[in-house]
Image: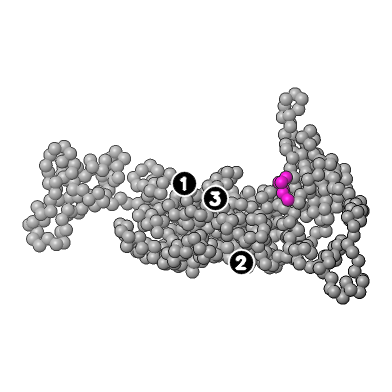
């Protein structure tokens, strides 16, 4: 996962260069002429070795010790910010972009055609296996309507999919049934497929070999979303790398268990996001350590695969959490004109381990200690517990403070101002935008229950596309300065209406019930008019319940149940509960002979 554009500083030993400062040269390195000429001198004695080592140790630098907030510190020189493209949306600000236009930047017509084609193949494959449902080939317009219903369900939450098509109930919704039937929506969901089913079988036969791709079933759409995210937007100076979990209990290789996350089981994504708005710039799906190039730690390779100088440019500030922070990574980033900041763990390699003048458990809240090694700052700050930070961006302390609640002598909680180091305050500011990004995804998520793991990722790709589209909308409005951006809810409503191809301000027409009386027999096939009143009669279902046998030429069109309609006994009305909150009003039933 390490990017080839990055250069990592290497020592002379790793590079294979000759060490000109070697103390002792071996005999084997001399040629015979040098030995015979008498220019060679014997190796030094052990006493001389010890004296040389002792002399060198006295010349070594003083051991590191922690400095306090009273000691002056200067921020390292900041690299010039040189982005590869102007930061922000890469769209024409003078044009009008509706929510549907922005969404189609990620789910283009070509992408939808591919999804329709692969879904049709999967449906044909399932029918051949014996599945019993009707299927017609998907069209571009119908698939967009399917996505519109997914977003409609994300805004109008019900307990089950079938409830959206529930009729004749106080909680009935008229819109879904006008867009698509329940059976059609469910069969599309059951057969939704991203990759080519024929190629899936060939990839499955490669299991256990290096050529097997565990993400093959999502690769076509994964590549499209990642490419569109980078093409449509260029990030601002502050970036963040963090983890995101897509909840799933699927027993497949890409799923992970992260006990510290709200969603403990699912797919782990390593995400590069813009700290200003929370835009998802790039992401990778973790498939196991075996897929990571050897030679570096996982955290090192993850960051290097996401932070690419060729695409981003130079001078970016990268904020990381404690999983990624290490001096080796920070030096590699600095060698490529990227500065970094993040908390580090005590056991991290090459971090200061000295206890001289260090923080203790008795240190007051707001106390800090710091050590600077060249341009790298190591800092410890006492909050409710010690916080360790590493930064190549900031000075140790510029006089910042934060508000904390503290209990006074009277036992009352009061707000107090606590000194806060610059790296801590800046880290909290920029990483907070990433939390906002995850919240935006969860507010109106399109996630649905599914039996296939790749459909979970499909719905997450929908969430990434809608959230990035909304951020593009906000920044375009800010750049124009004349239009107030929509709220997130209003944006999703307009996007849903656009996908469903209906006006946003329209009221769904009430659905007329199909529970009307029709003839049991097909009168168009009756030859003689005399037999129309007798042929085709069936036993009335309502009369049968009361142990009566009455034949009738009528039945309910929807229920397909024979019901008699007479002056003294209207079984059709009693069957449907007409007049008592039933399906139809008795005055709306018209009988045509």
Q: Is residue 344 magenta?
A: yes
Residue 112 is tagged as none
Looking at the rendered image, the disc whose residue lies closer to the viewer, 3 or 2, is: 3
Q: Quadrant of the C terminus?
A: bottom left
Q: Which residue is mark 1?
A: 157
- Residue 372 locus on image (x, y percent): 83, 51
Taking the spot 89% from the left edge, 73% from the top edge, the residue there is 36
* Residue situated in front as seen by the camera: 431 or 355: 355
Q: Which residues are magenta?
A: 343-349
Magenta span includes 259: no
Circle 2 packing at 10 Å, graded few (<14), some (14-19), many (20+), is some
456 or 439, which lies in front? 456
Secondary structure type for disc 2: helix
Q: Is residue 294 above or below residue 31?
A: above
Q: Nearer the viewer, residue 186 or 326?
A: 326
Q: Secondary structure at mark 1?
A: loop
Q: In the shown orientation, is residue 213 left or right of residue 175?
A: right
Query: Label 3 neighbourhood size at 10 Å, few (<14), some (14-19), many (20+)?
Result: many
Q: Is residue 573 visible?
A: yes
| Left or right: 22 in relation to 278 | right
**In the figure, is residue 463 to the left or right of 4?**
left
Closer to the observer: label 2 or label 1?
2
In the picture, measured across the screen, residue 581 lies left or right of residue 475, that is left
Q: Residue at x 32, y 60 (%)?
A: 129
Answer with mark 1 or mark 3, whichever residue precedes in sequence.
1
Main SS of residues in magenta:
loop
Label 3: which residue? 256
Q: Which residue is mark 2?
A: 231
């Amino acid at each position: 996962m390490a990017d080839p554009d990055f250069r990592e500083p290497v020592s002379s030993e790793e590079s294979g260069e000759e060490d000109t400062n070697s103390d002792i040269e071996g005999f084997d390195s001399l040629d015979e002429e040098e030995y015979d000429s008498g220019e060679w001198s014997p190796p030094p004695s052990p006493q001389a070795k010890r004296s040389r080592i002792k002399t060198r140790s006295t010349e070594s630098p003083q051991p590191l010790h922690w400095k306090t907030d009273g000691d002056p510190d200067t921020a390292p020189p900041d690299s010039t910010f040189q982005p590869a493209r102007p930061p922000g949306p890469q769209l024409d600000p003078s044009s009008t972009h509706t929510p549907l236009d922005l969404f189609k930047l990620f789910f283009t017509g070509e992408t939808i055609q591919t999804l329709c084609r692969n879904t049709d193949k999967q449906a044909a494959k399932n029918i051949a296996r014996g599945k019993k449902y009707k299927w017609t080939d998907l069209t571009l317009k119908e698939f967009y309507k399917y996505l519109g219903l997914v977003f409609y369900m994300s805004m109008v939450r019900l307990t089950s999919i079938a409830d959206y098509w529930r009729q004749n109930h106080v909680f009935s919704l008229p819109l879904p049934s006008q867009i698509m039937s329940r059976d059609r929506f469910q069969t599309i969901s059951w057969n939704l497929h991203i990759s080519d089913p024929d190629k899936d079988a060939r990839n499955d036969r490669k299991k256990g070999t290096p050529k097997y791709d565990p993400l093959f079933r999502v690769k076509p759409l994964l590549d499209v979303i990642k490419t569109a995210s980078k093409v449509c937007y260029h990030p601002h100076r502050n970036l963040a790398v963090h983890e995101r979990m897509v909840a799933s209990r699927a027993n497949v290789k890409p799923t992970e268990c992260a006990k510290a996350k709200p969603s403990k089981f699912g797919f782990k994504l390593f995400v590069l996001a813009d700290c200003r708005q929370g835009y998802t710039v790039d992401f990778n799906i973790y498939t196991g350590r075996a897929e990571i190039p050897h030679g570096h730690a996982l955290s090192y390779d993850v960051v290097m695969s996401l932070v690419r100088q060729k695409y981003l440019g130079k001078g970016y500030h990268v904020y990381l959490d404690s999983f990624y922070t290490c001096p080796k990574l920070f030096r590699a980033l600095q060698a490529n004109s990227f500065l970094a900041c993040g908390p580090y763990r005590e056991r991290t390699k090459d971090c200061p381990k000295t206890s001289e003048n260090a923080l203790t458990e008795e240190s007051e809240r707001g106390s800090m200690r710091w050590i600077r090694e060249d341009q790298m700052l190591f800092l410890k700050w006492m909050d409710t517990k010690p916080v360790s930070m590493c930064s190549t961006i900031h000075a140790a302390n510029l006089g910042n403070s934060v508000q904390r609640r503290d209990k006074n002598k009277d036992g009352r909680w009061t707000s107090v101002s606590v000194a806060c180091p610059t790296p801590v305050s800046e880290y909290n500011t920029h990483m907070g935008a990433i939390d906002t990004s995850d919240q935006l995804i969860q507010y109106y998520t399109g996630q649905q229950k599914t039996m296939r793991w790749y459909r979970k990722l499909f719905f997450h790709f929908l969430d990434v596309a809608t959230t990035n589209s909304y951020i593009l909308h906000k920044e375009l409005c800010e750049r124009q300065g004349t239009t107030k951006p929509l709220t997130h809810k209003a944006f999703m409503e307009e996007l849903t209406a656009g996908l469903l191809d209906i006006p946003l301000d329209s009221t769904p027409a009430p659905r007329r019930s199909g529970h009307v009386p029709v003839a049991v027999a097909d009168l168009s096939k009756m030859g003689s008019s005399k037999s129309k009143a007798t042929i085709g009669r069936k036993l009335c279902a309502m009369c049968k319940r009361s142990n009566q046998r009455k034949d009738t030429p009528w039945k309910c069109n929807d229920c397909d149940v024979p019901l008699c309609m007479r002056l003294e006994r209207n079984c059709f009305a009693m069957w449907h509960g007409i007049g008592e909150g039933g399906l139809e009003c008795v005055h709306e039933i018209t009988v045509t002979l």
